[in-house]
């Protein structure tokens, strides 16, 4: 099986996720030390889904992030560009309208959604600015963006421990639990290279979004950024 390189070639990234799709949610729970569900719950609360709200959930994978949005009555479209992830999602959650979509060239009309959200997927796009601009295009004026992504722990001693876990323990756990442990080495490297909270907020603002804020989870291991389309 394959792993992507840090140039994030779309075909390589898609193939990598195709290869880990079947056990992706399980392995993620193990690697996050069980925090995945709590992060998802906190992100859902920030999205604040409601009946009739139209939400685009990008990099939705198997639909674990989309499920609570639909349960709240929102009209959610789980989208991903990995065929393996889409297949696993359709099998696990056949009631959700999974759609193949490239974050850099979304197959949706302008001003179509009330909210665009992406959880742990923006980091894997080849062009962050273009992905943010595409989400801006498909969201209605007054609508929102919510990005959940790994970030930088705010307490320096914990940040050192966390970085050591990413580059040493995470690959070891992945080798024991995943069918494609090299994929998780890429994920660890991509997390370490990702901008911190303030830098990502600046990128979101540069893409045209306004009122950018963020909420730290687990001491900044994850940050949920929220912004508005003017």
Image: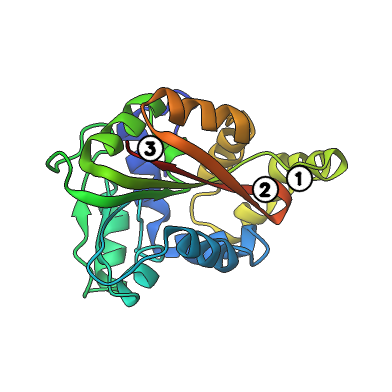
Looking at the image, which residue is at 54% across and 37% down? 186
User: Which structural element holds mark 3?
Assistant: helix
Looking at the image, which residue is at 32% across and 36% down? 230
Residue 3 in view: no
Q: Which residue is mark 3?
A: 13
Q: Which residue is mark 1?
A: 162
Q: Within 10 Å of the Cα at label 3, are there few (<14), some (14-19), or many (20+) other Cα atoms?
A: many
Q: Within 10 Å of the Cα at label 1, are there few (<14), some (14-19), or many (20+) other Cα atoms?
A: some
Tags 3 and 1 in contact by the CB under 8 Å rule?
Answer: no
User: Which structural element holds mark 1?
Assistant: helix
| Percent x, y of residue 226 | 47, 45
- Residue 221: assigned label: 2
Tags 2 and 1 in contact by the CB under 8 Å rule?
Answer: yes
Q: Residue furthest left?
A: 109
- Frontmost of labels 2 and 1 is 2
Q: Within 10 Å of the Cα at label 2, are there few (<14), some (14-19), or many (20+) other Cα atoms?
A: some
Residue in front for this viewpoint, 160 or 133: 133
């Amino acid at each position: 099986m394959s792993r992507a390189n840090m140039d994030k070639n779309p075909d390589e990234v898609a193939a990598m996720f195709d290869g880990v799709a079947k056990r992706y949610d399980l392995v993620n729970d193990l690697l996050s030390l069980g925090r995945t569900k709590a992060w998802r719950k906190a992100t859902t609360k920030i999205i604040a889904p409601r009946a009739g709200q139209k939400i685009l959930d990008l990099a939705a994978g198997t639909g674990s992030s989309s499920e609570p949005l639909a349960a709240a009555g929102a009209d959610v479209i789980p989208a991903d560009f990995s065929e393996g992830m889409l297949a696993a999602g359709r099998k696990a959650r056949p009631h959700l309208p999974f759609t193949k979509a490239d974050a850099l060239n979304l197959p949706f009309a302008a001003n179509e959604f009330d909210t665009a959200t992406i959880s742990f997927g923006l980091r894997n796009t080849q062009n962050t600015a273009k992905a943010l601009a595409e989400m801006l295009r498909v969201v209605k004026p007054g609508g929102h963006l919510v990005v959940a992504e790994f970030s930088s722990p705010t307490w320096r001693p914990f940040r050192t421990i966390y970085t050591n876990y990413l580059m040493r323990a995470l690959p070891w756990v992945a080798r024991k639990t995943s069918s494609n442990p090299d994929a998780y080495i890429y994920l660890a490297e991509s997390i370490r290279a990702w901008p911190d909270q303030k830098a990502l907020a600046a990128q979101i603002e540069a893409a045209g979004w306004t009122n950018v804020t963020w909420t730290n989870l687990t001491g900044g291991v994850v940050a949920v950024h929220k912004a508005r389309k003017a």
